[in-house]
Image (cartoon, helix red, strand yellow):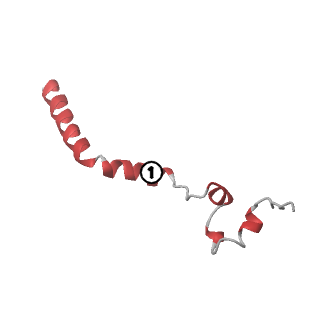
Amino acid sequence: MAAVVEKLTADNMAEFLPASGAYSSIELVIGRILRSLCELSYEMRVSEAGELTTYHKKLLMGIRSAHV
């Protein structure tokens, strides 16, 4: 007996996923929520804040002392 495989589209995928209207068809196909560029850059800034802040302060002090 041959199995019939139906091609998944945004229309028929709605049957399988509750509240699928909250996601784009690309998000449904790849199976994860896409993030905006602002969200990605914010996460990078937060995860590197400690080291980056120290480096930035030292860099500014060096620039100020070089221009005096």
User: Which corner quadrant of the image does residue 61 belong to?
Assistant: top left
What residue is at 77 percent from the left and 67 percent from the top?
A: 12
Q: Could you say where residue 19 lies in the image, as x and y percent from the top left?
A: 63, 74
Farthest front residue in view: 1
Looking at the image, which is closer to me, 29 or 6?
6
Q: Name the element at disc 1.
A: helix
Q: Which residue is mark 1?
A: 40
Farthest right residue in view: 1
Q: In the picture provided, is 19 more to the left or to the right than 11? A: left
Looking at the image, which is closer to me, 41 or 7?
7
Q: Could you say where residue 46 lies in the image, as x and y percent from the top left?
A: 32, 52
Residue neighbourhood size for the residue with mark 1, other residues' Cα within 10 Å, grouped as few (<14), some (14–19), many (≥20) = few
| Amino acid tagged 1 | Leu
Looking at the image, which is closer to me, 41 or 29?
29
Q: In the picture provided, is 5 more to the left or to the right than 64? A: right
Q: Could you say where residue 28 lies in the image, as x and y percent from the top left?
A: 65, 60
For the N terminus, the quadrant is bottom right
Total labels: the figure holds 1
What residue is at 19 percent from the left and 41 percent from the top?
A: 54
What residue is at 76 percent from the left and 67 percent from the top?
A: 11
Q: Could you say where residue 37 lies in the image, as x and y percent from the top left?
A: 49, 50
For the C terminus, the quadrant is top left
Q: In the picture provided, is 62 more to the left or to the right than 44? A: left
Q: In the picture provided, is 49 more to the left or to the right than 11? A: left
Is residue 28 positioned above or below 57 on the image? below
What residue is at 27 percent from the left and 48 percent from the top?
A: 49
